[in-house]
């Protein structure tokens, strides 16, 4: 997806570069070389409230990390997934579509089956676009 093809509701949310926009990053990592860390740091620098999700909990990039998505305090506007497709599928199956505005599938987190699942279960599912790039252009 090009930034111009991102759904308007998501673009509007990302234009609010403040802590009022809450983005959970599932697959957050303490390894500064991994996208699960790069995305957390980048979105936090842009001003968003970033909620790292990693089974180990603790902190990631200086932010409190949650062991699973169910533990993350609501509201969560965007769930950004940086996980292998099989993990992404399990997360999407367990996530109540009424609790988030959009799911965002980062490259590497999906295959055709995951895309079909995301589009069937969630009103807004973004894929083939990087949230850092799109957010920076808005």
Image (spheres, helix red, strand yellow):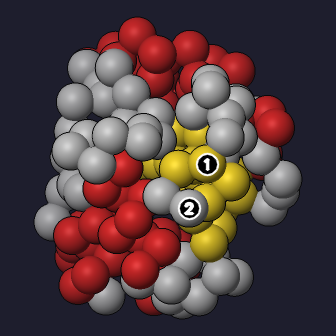
* In contact (CB < 8 Å): disc 1 and disc 2: yes
88 vs 68, nearest the viewer: 68
Residue 54 in sight in this render: yes
Which residue position is annotated with label 1?
A: 59
Report the side of 65 relative to 47 (left or right).
right
How many callouts does the rendering have? 2
- Coordinates of residue 28 in the picture (x, y in percent): 46, 41
Q: Quadrant of the C terminus?
A: bottom left
- Coordinates of residue 23 in the picture (x, y in percent): 57, 61
Residue 123 in sight in this render: no
- Coordinates of residue 65 in the picture (x, y in percent): 65, 46
Q: Is residue 61 above or below residue 110?
A: below
Q: Residue at horizontal 67%, vertical 40%? A: 58
For the residue labelled by badge 1, is the local secondary structure a helix, a strand or a loop?
strand
At label 2, counting other C-alpha atoms closer than 10 Å, the crowd grade (few under 14, some 14-19, many 20 or more) is few
For the residue labelled by badge 2, is the local secondary structure a helix, a strand or a loop?
loop
Which residue position is annotated with label 2?
A: 62
Q: Is residue 20 above or below residue 87?
A: below
Q: Is residue 128 above or below residue 41?
A: above
Q: Residue at horizontal 48%, vertical 73%? A: 44
Quadrant in the rendering for residue 133: bottom left
Report the side of 104 relative to 90 (left or right).
left
């Amino acid at each position: 997806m090009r930034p111009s093809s991102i759904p308007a509701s998501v673009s509007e949310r990302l234009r609010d570069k403040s802590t009022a926009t809450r983005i959970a990053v599932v697959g957050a990592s303490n390894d500064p070389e991994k996208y699960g860390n790069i995305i957390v740091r980048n979105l936090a620098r842009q001003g968003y409230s970033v909620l790292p999700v990693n089974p180990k909990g603790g902190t990631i990039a200086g932010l409190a990390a949650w062991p699973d998505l169910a533990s993350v305090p609501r509201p969560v506007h965007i769930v950004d997934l940086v996980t292998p497709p099989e993990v992404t599928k399990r997360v999407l199956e367990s996530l109540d579509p009424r609790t988030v505005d959009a799911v965002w599938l980062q490259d590497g987190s999906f295959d055709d089956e995951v895309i079909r699942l995301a589009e069937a279960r969630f009103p807004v599912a973004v894929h083939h676009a990087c949230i850092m790039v799109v957010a920076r252009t808005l």
